[in-house]
Image (cartoon, rainbow, N blue to C red):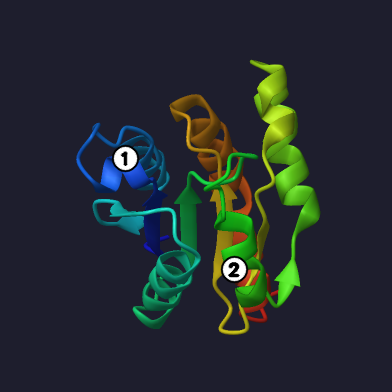
Amino acid sequence: MNLKACVITVSDRASQGVYEDRSGPAAVQILRDAGFDVSAPVVIPDSKEEIQRSICEAVAGRARLVLTTGGTGVGPRDFTPEATAPLIDRELTHLMGAIVAKGLQSTPHALITRGLAGLTKEGALVVNAPGSTGGVRDAAEVVVTVASHILAQVDGEDH
């Protein structure tokens, strides 16, 4: 497959070194195991501007899949969906529905995510995953089952 992917961890505390980012590396491992070309996660603070800049930089760097982790809840600094929304050209609501459904197998807290999934005008798939390691694993495991097919369709291939 060898599609390029980027994982962006959105966390004030992890970006400040208060604690170690565990969700980003978990997502990276799942994407690598599925055949994606992905580097170490980018760790940024909970800032709309930083989130948008990081997603745009990943897409400009030819990432076909951008998975963010963190900032999808209802906390006062959870801005990831609001930062992502203007970058999405076509939303994939049922992809997020599948991620929530998988999460519900483990915890009712999966219902709290406000994450978005969709395609940018450049044809990259962007998915907002929860910041917990379980939530990001659920999201990444769902995404890798369909990402190649989604991106092939974006590229005009038959389905």
Q: Earlier in the sequence, mark 1 or mark 2?
A: 1
The residue shown at (55%, 44%) is: 129
Measuring from the top left, give residue 136's x and y in whole percent.
Answer: 50, 36
Q: Which residue is mark 2?
A: 151
User: What amino acid does circle 1 point to?
Assistant: Arg
Q: Quadrant of residue 61?
A: bottom left
Vertical comparison of 24 with 117: above or below:
above
From mark 1 to mark 2, how far is it between C-alphas?
Answer: 33 Å
What SS does tag 2 mark?
Answer: helix
**Residue 63's disc number:** none
Q: Is residue 116 left or right of residue 141?
A: right
Vertical comparison of 128 with 55: above or below:
above
Vertical comparison of 26 with 78: above or below:
above
The residue shown at (36%, 35%) is: 26
The residue shown at (41%, 50%) is: 10
**Residue at the farthest top position:** 106
Q: Is residue 20 left or right of residue 99?
A: left
What SS does tag 1 mark?
Answer: helix
Measuring from the top left, give residue 96's x and y in whole percent.
Answer: 71, 47
Q: Which residue is mark 1?
A: 13
How would you rate the neighbour count of disc 1 (Cα within 10 Å): few for under 14, some for 14-19, many for 20 or more? some
